[in-house]
Image: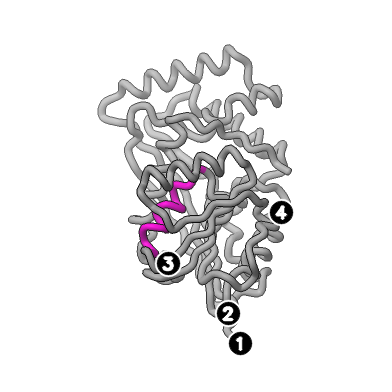
Amino acid sequence: MTEYALKLSEAELARYQFMAESAARAEADLWAAAGVAEGAAVADIGCGPGAVSAVLGRMVGPSGSVLAVDRDPDVVDAARLTAGRAGVDNVTFGVGVAEDTGLPSSSVDLVMVRHVLAHNGSREQAIVDHAATLVRPGGAVYLVDIDMPAFRLRPDDEDLADLSGRYQEWHAQQGNDLSVGLRLGELLVGAGLVDVEHHGRYLIFPVAPGSRPPGWAARDALAAAGLATQEDIERWEGAFGRFDELEPRPTTFVSQFVAFGRRPAG
């Protein structure tokens, strides 16, 4: 099983919250088309610290529910705190792996799997296959993932590009596919789902001072794998310090893919 590399610092939690709120806005049309609505029952597989789970709980309302699962008990505890701080009480959290969550089959209207497949090596199809068993006939499985090699940051910075390259190398060592976003439609079809839609978008936004990418949160994992020294980490930290002072703010470009498909109604 791939190691969970991202340390849940306050900066990392803030990044998750920003991503969740951004997703709710940028994907509003796709969430609605897939079935995120008042009264819906939703499963959030690989929920991380619960930022998306809390947003989903708010959107499905008191008559709806969210079942959120992550493999790391400490992360699940953080997710409960996230929901509590958001005042959301219709989300239930549990510990389970993405390809065997322990959730009942045919129990929800929608399964959401966000930025999970790129962290799970060769198990992508098994995860999507399992998700397909959890939705009721006519329900949807909704996948989100990336094409990491297409990531860009302006202005360029050699030190931060070096960090990104080593983070991608770490994923390659784990057997992960950081371009899995290109395969989401294929994975849904492979799980026997129909009416599959596959969309791609470039997310473009200014980098807030203090914001840090996943590679920085994974710096201890990089060091443990022999991909970073303390000198490297200090050099990257200095680069972030420079970036925090830049005006106008630097811009990040993230290639993201969304796909969903439905369990046959018959």
Which residue is depicted at the point 30% across and 23% down? 246
Measured along the vertical axis of the image, is residue 128 above or below residue 245? below
Measured along the vertical axis of the image, is residue 177 above or below residue 235? below
What residue is disc 3 on? 64
Lower position in the chain sequence, tag 2 or tag 1: 2
Whether 96 is among the magenta residues is no
Pick the quarter of the image with the N terminus.
top right
What residue is disc 4 on? 123
Lower position in the chain sequence, tag 3 or tag 2: 3
Q: Which residues are magenta?
A: 49-60
Q: Could you classify mark 2 by the number of other residues whose Cα lies within 10 Å: few (under 14), some (14-19), or many (20 or more)?
A: some
CA separation in Å, label 4 and label 3: 30 Å
- From the top left corner, tell me how far across and down residue 21 is, in percent: 36, 49
What kind of element bears circle 1?
loop
Asked if residue 181 lies left or right of residue 207, the reply is: right
Three-letter code for the amino acid on which mark 1 is drawn: Gly
Three-letter code for the amino acid on which mark 4 is drawn: Arg
| Labelled disc at residue 188 | none
Farthest residue toward the left? 248
- From the top left corner, tell me how far across and down residue 188 is, in percent: 61, 67
Q: Could you classify mark 4 by the number of other residues whose Cα lies within 10 Å: few (under 14), some (14-19), or many (20 or more)?
A: some
